[in-house]
Amino acid sequence: MDRDAFAEAVAWTARALPTRHAVPVLAGMRLEVSPDGSSLHLSGFDYEVSTRASVEVLAEESGAALVPGRLLAEIVNNLPSGTVRIETDGSRVRVSAGAARFTLITMPLEDYPSLPGMPGRIGSVPADALTAAVRQVTPAASRDDTLPMLTGAYLDFTGDRLSVVATDRYRIAVRELWWKPEDPGIDADALVPARTLANTVRGLINQSNVDVALGGEGMIGFENGERATTTRLIDSDFVKYASWFPTEFSARAEVPVGPLLEAVKRVALVADRNTPLRLAFTEGEVVLEAGSGDDAQAVEALEVGYEGAPIRLAFRPDYLADGLTGVETDTAHLNFTEPTKPAVFTDAAEEPSFRYLVQPLRVS
């Protein structure tokens, strides 16, 4: 088989493999040659996430083997370009390319669990749009596993609109995009582990579509070309987030995203993650400050468009950076009510597709 195609298929499949597991066989990747010898099917499963991929091969015979998955991924990623050959010899699998030769010991195939089936297809979404939406939203998901609901990305399928939402209680990110449902009147939702969703979109093929599958058994699936994955949903209701967003604002700044993001990163060098980065908006300018007293300090001013009374706010630097990074337009709108009330960042569109609400920090 071709080394590059094989490496991509192995990398996709290895995402589901645990680094450590009480059941050793789950660290294996199942390789199976189709009966007609034209394709190699790869699969991984950890009882939560399953992954499948296929690659074209020229095979002399069909068969299956279970090999250490992460080791295989490391080996294939470092093989020279060209053709890869795989051979089995009893309990050994030989992988070779160019002058490189590796021998792996197989794992007991009969102990490997059956993968869950793909749920029913509910529609499709462009891969690049889904990838962008997930990257914009998932940084706002919580990493605290004691509140599973907040570690998820909420997918809301309503008609031809798909909303991707995440929150950690201190901020909330929402991205709306178009998708093509099987049923135009669909009204469904799913709470997907954010980390799993972020890993899934990393391996999608751009300029293609992703089929979305949703089942009543608490499972969601994504299929993209020869790649497929399923994951268990988080069994919890998501927060009623729509009411969190203010309906009116007293001030708005129009800021250049790139320059402001660079300024935030520079000024934040003197602040740790929980130290506030202060922003003072006046007509035509924002001044960024961090540090005070006997600590290191930084100040930088930037030209911006601003409407409203002067206002001073403070944010966690990483929360500020995540919100700005999520904006895809060259300029962003920063909307304010009061220094202690949530601010809302949006892209510079008449009807923004991305909204990011963030709670300022209280400073004396």
Image (tube, rainbow, N blue to C red):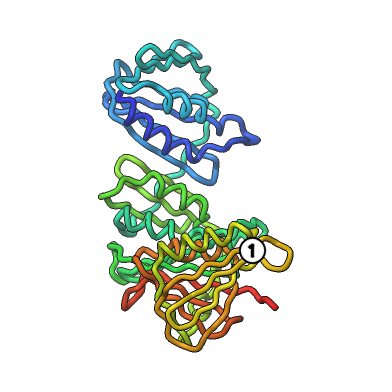
Q: Secondary structure at mark 1?
A: loop
Give the residue type that dot 1 points to. Gln
The residue that appears at 49% across and 63% down in the rendered structure is 263
User: Which of 289/8 is in front?
Assistant: 289
The residue that appears at 31% across and 72% down in the rendered structure is 185
**Quarter of the figure with the N terminus:** top left
Q: Is residue 248 above or below residue 359?
A: below
Q: Is residue 202 above or below residue 255?
A: above
Task: Say left or right for 149 vs 294.
Answer: left
The residue that appears at 34% across and 34% down in the rendered structure is 54
Task: Say left or right for 225 vs 315.
Answer: left
The residue that appears at 48% across and 40% down in the rendered structure is 15
Q: Toward which corner of the image does residue 294 lie, by quadrant?
A: bottom right
Q: Toward which corner of the image does residue 340 lie, by quadrant?
A: bottom right
User: Which of 10/318 is in front?
Assistant: 318
Which residue lies under the disc numbered 1? Answer: 297
The residue furthest right is 294
Q: Position of residue 77 (x, y in %)?
A: 42, 28
Q: Toward which corner of the image does residue 124 lie, by quadrant?
A: bottom left
Q: Position of residue 315 (x, y in %)?
A: 59, 70
Q: Is residue 93 visible?
A: yes
**Quarter of the figure with the C terminus:** bottom right
Q: Position of residue 106 (x, y in %)?
A: 51, 20
User: Which of 157/207 is in front?
Assistant: 207
Q: Is residue 74 above or below residue 273?
A: above
Q: Is residue 187 visible?
A: no
Q: Position of residue 298 (x, y in %)?
A: 59, 64
